[in-house]
């Protein structure tokens, strides 16, 4: 089944509604008493958690609950996969992929670099996604027809920028010490040594900056589906590329990921990254 323009328009508008509903829950808790818990306490956690600390707040749980409620009311036949509340009909024709607060560490530190990630799969393929930062009043939305930024009552198209060489690139990763194993970290350091500038700790907000043409590349590892799927239509709709560390399309289960605005620095980076590809 191919989605019609009218179906896409309705789903696109619904994504905006979902962002507004989640922001109503999250914003009152940002830089306030957010009910911090450590859901990793006493567990053997993957390397993507730092020193055994896996934070979750009332904002994470409340926002995902609000999003799920709207989906159930509007599209009861759709499935949902979310970081906080797991899977519901993951094999449905349409499946929403949710990370209500991507960058919870930034959130609890009072930094406006966290985002709300809302993506939609159709027949197993990501077709629509948004990266929202409500404190900055920004929603980045993308699909095959293009990507745009909605901010302060205005909507404008966004595009990746040209970058001819890795030595000209501004790159990012969240935390190379926590997110990469030894071989992955070595590969990252090789790419970083060649790049013009590297920024750390931006989480999924860096994805939006690549789509907007302000950064050139993001390299991550150990991702879950909810960490990346919403960003794929945003980046690709803006003319960018999303691959794994082999240069292949990233699968539904996350893993190692590269986002690039231009194919040329991506090809250079993959020379190093392929050696640690999994």
Image (cartoon, rainbow, N blue to C red):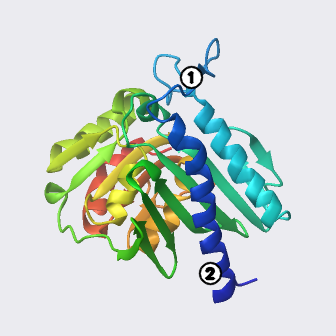
Compared with 79, 221 (above or below) is above
Residue 135 in sight here: yes
- Where disc 2 sits, the SS reads helix
Q: Which residue is labeled 2 in the image? A: 9
Quadrant of the drawing holding the N terminus:
bottom right
Q: Which residue is labeled 1 in the image? A: 36
How far across and how far down the image is residue 81, in percent? 71, 50
Residue that extends furthest to the top in the rendered view of this protein:
42
How far apart marks 1 and 2 lie (CA) works out to: 37 Å
How far across and how far down the image is residue 115, in percent? 47, 48
The reply to whether callout 1 and callout 2 are in contact (CB within 8 Å) is: no
Residue shown at 43% from the left, 31% from the top: 31
Compared with 276, 181 (above or below) is above
Residue nearest the viewer, comparing 163 with 80: 80
Residue 4 in sight here: no
How far across and how far down the image is residue 22, in percent? 60, 50
């Amino acid at each position: 089944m191919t989605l019609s323009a009218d179906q896409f328009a309705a789903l696109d508008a619904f994504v905006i509604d979902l962002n507004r509903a989640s922001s109503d829950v999250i914003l009152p808790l940002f830089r306030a008493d957010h009910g911090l818990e450590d859901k990793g306490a006493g567990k053997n956690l993957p390397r993507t958690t730092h020193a055994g600390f896996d934070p979750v707040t009332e904002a994470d749980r409340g926002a995902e609950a609000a999003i799920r409620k709207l989906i159930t009311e509007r599209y009861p036949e759709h499935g949902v996969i979310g970081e906080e509340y797991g899977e519901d009909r993951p094999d449905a024709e349409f499946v929403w992929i949710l990370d209500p607060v991507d960058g919870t560490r930034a959130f609890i530190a009072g930094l406006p670099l966290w985002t709300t990630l809302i993506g939609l799969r159709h027949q197993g393929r990501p077709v629509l996604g948004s990266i929202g930062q409500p404190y900055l009043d920004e929603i980045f939305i993308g699909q095959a027809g293009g990507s745009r930024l909605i901010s302060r009552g205005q909507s404008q198209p966004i595009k990746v920028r040209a970058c001819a060489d890795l030595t000209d690139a501004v790159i990012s990763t969240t935390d190379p010490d926590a997110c990469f194993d030894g071989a992955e970290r070595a590969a990252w350091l090789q790419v970083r040594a060649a790049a013009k500038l590297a920024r750390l700790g931006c989480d999924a907000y860096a994805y939006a900056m690549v789509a907007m043409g302000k950064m050139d590349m993001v390299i991550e590892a150990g991702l879950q589906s909810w960490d990346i799927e919403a960003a794929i239509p945003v980046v690709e709709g803006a003319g960018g590329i999303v691959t794994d560390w082999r240069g292949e399309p990233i699968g539904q289960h996350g893993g190692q990921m590269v986002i690039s605005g231009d194919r040329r620095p991506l090809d250079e980076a993959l020379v190093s990254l392929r050696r640690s590809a999994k």
